């Protein structure tokens, strides 16, 4: 396959407090076998050659699991392909001559650091508020003494598959973090080991989520559509049930 | 420099327990008076920081990523070994120990490996207690599968995301300690140098990657859990940020570096698709359970795979290794693929690939079964290559995956610098010259949850440390060096990008110090690398400023260290005139099979830095095999 000509409109913002704007660039030698981040690499090499600062963007594993990457591509979190992170999105998904707009996640709780890089520290703080099981090293019983029905273990795994990329927040018109938070509440709440702290956990995490400035959930389901790991909105319903029970009983 | 392994006396099976009893302790009330720095938050670093925090120490943890949850341990797919013997199929601590020593081609330290096998069972208990959703059977018990280099089922897993789930478990334990204020977390903060006071590791100098500020942190001990150096090859399965800076800087301060030439090349990765390639993606080893590896018999055969009749295909692994066939160990399968491609029989663009064919398996088991087993991997393959592996064979090629070499450590995981402990892939100790599948996760967590928290307590309890803070002149001096270096990168303003240099270095290393190494090739690399390094320091272009986020500047610092470290790797590869595990010297083989030389090379090669422009000095730690008899690895 030959090379593709792509026009990129990229959000450039020099720092957290500066104003940003979309800047148009042309890449004439894009290969359909490139990943989207490799297209940004090619653009950056070109910018460096002409003496312009390269575009800053977060990325690390480039195999869809670390959750570091994530940008809005033509208004879609991680781009148009379902169940795919930006690093796994390949240029053959696009057409020769396309114009692609690239922006950072937009959410008050995810302030822009530079260009396409945002600060997702709020997610870590939500985990700090209860997203764990208090099992200090050394005190564990034999792993097979805890029997877990396979369906429960599988469902807990589905929730635990979250990579913490923030696409759910970016896709939500309210910038809600309900999918992220509920995935962790569900993962731990579905397991016997997670029961002792179950209700305290959901209260703590939801409180922190609100404090960080994430919006409320209005059941639009955009988060599930954008999630590269296919985390289901059913977990939000599960969290709401736990939350209600927690507020009534504690 | 003296290499004191500090292996405890007594029978192998009792060494760790005896040592644990004999080690000094720190009173719980006194622990918070000790500050511990942990650099890196992958499996080893996060588990160590969390556990030391739980014990009551004052921990400061650092990572260059935006969150500790992103470390590259997260990408491990297959599983984690543990000698639980839940399958009742003959596994034991002794057998896991034996398999690991043999798999490492007899180049690991027995006592460390034995402890690893002992601790492995506790790791699974700890992970389950934390809520890590490991795979279960219908009865609710944990499931296992088997992996290369073992004849028992001892691998625990969480679908194809075992590393992710174990890392999230350690990350959550870490976040819990951050909330409890025993751990202070510094994300997007990169360690750029180590600080020694009176010859003892007392702190680090870091750069805040968001503000650009360079500052110091002092402590009673420093722990490096900063991973491997596979990215010296530019193209590898490592994350883009993985680098050697922390352990290399420590090397320059006196921490011997062991066996840098031991690198693992994984046989089943997706081939390079073009010059734009930024990294390589692994396809799980498990695929070789049902896939058959082949290339055309004729050189330069350009036909579509379907058009090549059975008689004109060479199933070379089945032909050369009839008893292990497609499940031959990683190093052997990788070299065989390279041989076929070097012979002009490679497939796909550039001829750098071999087929991994599922047609027979689909015929035998049906498409549904194959989809159930490997569906997610097939999808990933199609997403990356645009080819459907149900319809046409996958194309695969070996890629750099893991580095067995690392900072030399004693039994207590302490380096040759007192007070500097090194954990996980960053140290050298457990895998010898070749790591078995599902053993990296085991080692990272063994070091972090169980070994280091005990031995660091012993270090703090038995060492008299003067009070030192960051106003000490040594901190000021190192800070200034780091500032000067940062300024230097920004001031060169040459014509070539950091990545262009990195690609060139990677090509030198892959060609001369990759899957097959020769004396001539290594000698040539030792000329090419210094020349490239000299050009880098004259002609690199790093735009922007040091104040604020500057990813080119970060990359420049990491590459500058790789450009020096690469030379050490080649030097080590040149000196080791034998073939063992991942290190294959073309001159030392028996009809294509690696030929070890135990007479001359049954030792750990630990290199000491002697100053700018001085050749490093080799120290040898002899390897004594008391429990496992030295034997030739054969998979024929």
Image (spheres, coloured by chain):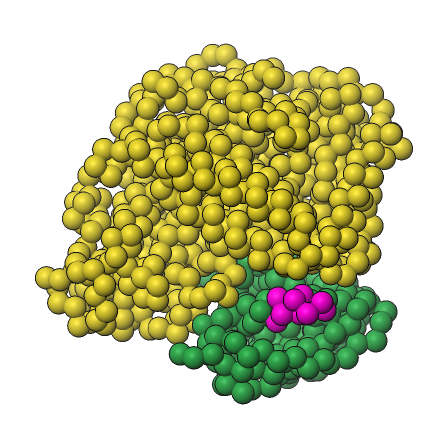
Chain colours: A green, B yellow
Which of the pair B201/A177 is nearer the observer?
B201
Front residue of B18 and B606: B606
Quarter that holds the N terminus of chain A: bottom left
The residue lying at 17 percent from left, 60 percent from top is B298
In the image, residue B542 sits, relative to residue A115, either above or below, namely: above
Q: Is residue B586 left or right of residue A43?
A: left
Would residue B112 be counted in the magenta stretch?
A: no
Q: Where is residue B429 in the image (x, y as percent from the top left)?
A: 50, 30
Q: Is residue A106 above or below residue B223?
A: below
**Taken as a whole, is the magenta stretch helix, strand or loop?**
helix
Q: What quarter of the picture does the C terminus of chain A occupy?
A: bottom right
Q: Can residue B525 be seen in this view?
A: yes
Can residue B44 be spotted in the picture?
A: no
Q: Where is residue B400 in the image (x, y as percent from the top left)?
A: 44, 49
Q: In which quarter of the image is residue B545?
A: bottom right
Residue at horizontal 73%, vertical 81%?
Answer: A22
Residue B599 shown left or right of residue B431 in the figure: left
Residue at 39 percent across and 49 percent down: it is B266
For the residue pair B578 and B45, the one nearer the viewer reads as B578
Quadrant of the rendered structure where residue B582 is?
A: top left
- The image shows residue B198, relative to residue B275, as above or below, that is above
Q: Give the range drawn in magenta.
A: A43-52
Q: Quadrant of residue B497?
A: bottom right
Seen as rendered, the residue at the extreme top is: B9
| B352 left or right, relative to A136 | left
Residue A151: x percent and y percent?
A: 44, 62
Q: Where is residue B621 in the image (x, y as percent from the top left)?
A: 49, 19
């Amino acid at each position: 396959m030959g090379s593709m000509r792509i026009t990129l409109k990229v959000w450039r913002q020099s720092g957290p407090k500066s104003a940003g704007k979309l800047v148009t660039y042309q890449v004439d030698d894009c290969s359909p076998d490139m990943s989207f981040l490799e297209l940004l690499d090619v653009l950056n090499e070109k910018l460096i050659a002409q003496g312009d600062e390269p575009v800053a963007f977060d990325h690390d594993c480039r195999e869809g699991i670390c959750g570091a990457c994530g940008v809005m591509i033509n208004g879609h979190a991680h781009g148009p392909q379902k169940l795919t992170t930006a690093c796994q999105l390949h240029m053959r998904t696009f057409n020769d001559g396309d114009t692609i707009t690239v922006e950072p996640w937009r959410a008050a709780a995810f302030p822009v650091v530079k260009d396409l890089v945002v600060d997702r520290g709020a997610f870590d703080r939500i985990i700090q508020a209860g997203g764990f099981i208090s099992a200090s090293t050394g005190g564990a019983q034999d792993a097979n003494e805890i029997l877990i029905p396979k369906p429960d273990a599988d469902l807990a795994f589905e929730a635990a598959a979250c990579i913490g990329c923030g696409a759910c927040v970016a896709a939500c018109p309210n910038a809600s973090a309900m999918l992220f938070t509920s995935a962790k509440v569900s993962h731990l709440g579905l397991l016997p080991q997670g029961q002792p702290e179950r209700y305290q956990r959901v209260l703590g995490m939801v409180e922190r989520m609100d404090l960080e400035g994430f919006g409320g959930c209005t059941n639009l389901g955009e988060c599930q559509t954008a999630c590269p790991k296919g985390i289901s909105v059913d977990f939000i319903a599960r969290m709401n049930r736990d939350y209600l029970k927690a507020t009534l009983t504690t | 420099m003296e290499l004191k392994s500090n292996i405890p006396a007594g029978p192998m099976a009792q060494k760790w327990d005896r040592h644990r009893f004999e080690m000094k302790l720190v009173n719980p009330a006194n622990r918070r008076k000790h500050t511990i720095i942990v650099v890196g938050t992958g499996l080893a670093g996060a588990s160590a920081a969390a556990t030391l925090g739980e014990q009551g120490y004052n921990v400061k943890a650092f990572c260059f990523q935006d969150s500790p949850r992103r470390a590259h341990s997260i990408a491990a797919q297959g599983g984690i070994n543990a000698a639980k013997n839940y399958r009742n199929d003959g596994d034991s601590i002794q057998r896991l120990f034996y398999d690991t020593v043999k798999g490492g081609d007899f180049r690991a330290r027995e006592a460390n490996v034995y402890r690893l096998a002992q601790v492995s069972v506790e790791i699974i208990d700890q992970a389950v207690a934390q809520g890590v959703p490991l795979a279960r059977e219908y009865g609710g018990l944990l499931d296992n599968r088997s992996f290369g280099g073992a004849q028992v089922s001892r691998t625990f897993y969480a679908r194809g995301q075992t590393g992710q789930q174990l890392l999230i478990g350690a990350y959550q334990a870490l976040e819990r300690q951050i909330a409890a204020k025993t751990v202070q977390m510094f994300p997007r903060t990169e360690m750029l140098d180590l600080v020694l006071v009176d010859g003892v590791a007392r702190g680090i100098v870091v750069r805040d990657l968001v503000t650009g500020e360079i500052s110091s942190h002092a402590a009673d001990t420093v722990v490096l859990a900063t991973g491997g150096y596979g990215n010296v090859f530019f193209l590898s399965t490592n994350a883009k940020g993985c680098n050697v800076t922390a352990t290399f800087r420590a090397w320059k301060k006196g921490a011997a570096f062991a066996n840098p030439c031991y690198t693992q090349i994984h046989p089943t990765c997706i081939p390079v698709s073009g010059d734009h390639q930024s990294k390589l993606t692994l396809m799980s080893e498990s695929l070789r359970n049902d896939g058959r590896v082949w290339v055309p018999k004729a050189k330069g055969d350009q036909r579509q795979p379907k058009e090549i009749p059975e008689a004109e295909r060479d199933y070379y692994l089945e032909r050369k290794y009839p008893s292990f066939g497609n499940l031959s160990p990683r190093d052997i399968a990788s070299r065989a693929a390279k041989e076929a491609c070097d012979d002009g029989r490679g497939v796909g663009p550039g001829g750098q690939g071999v087929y991994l064919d599922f047609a027979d398996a689909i015929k035998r088991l049906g498409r549904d079964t194959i989809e159930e087993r490997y569906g997610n991997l097939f999808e990933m393959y199609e997403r990356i290559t645009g080819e459907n592996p149900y319809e046409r064979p996958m194309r695969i090629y070996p890629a750099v995956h893991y580095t067995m070499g690392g900072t030399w450590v004693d039994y207590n995981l302490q380096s040759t610098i007192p007070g500097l402990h090194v954990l996980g892939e960053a140290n050298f100790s457990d895998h010898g010259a070749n790591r078995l599948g599902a053993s990296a996760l085991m080692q990272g967590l063994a070091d972090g949850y169980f070994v280091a928290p005990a031995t660091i307590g012993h270090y703090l309890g038995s060492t008299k440390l003067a009070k030192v803070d960051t106003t000490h002149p040594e901190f000021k001096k190192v800070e200034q060096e780091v500032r000067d270096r940062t300024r230097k990168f920004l001031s060169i303003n040459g014509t070539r990008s950091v990545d262009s240099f990195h690609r060139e270095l990677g090509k030198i290393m892959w060609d001369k110090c990759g899957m097959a190494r020769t004396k001539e090739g290594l000698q040539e690399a030792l000329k090419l690398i210094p020349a490239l390094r000299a050009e880098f320091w004259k002609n690199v272009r790093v735009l922007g400023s040091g104040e604020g986020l500057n990813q080119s500047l970060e990359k420049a610092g990491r590459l500058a260290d790789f450009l020096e470290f690469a030379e050490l790797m080649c030097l080590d590869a040149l000196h080791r005139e034998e073939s063992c595990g991942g290190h294959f010297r073309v001159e030392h083989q028996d009809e294509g099979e690696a030929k070890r030389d135990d007479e001359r090379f049954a030792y750990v090669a630990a290199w000491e830095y002697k100053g700018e422009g001085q050749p490093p000095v080799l120290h040898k730690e002899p390897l004594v095999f008391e429990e496992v008899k030295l034997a030739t690895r054969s998979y024929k």
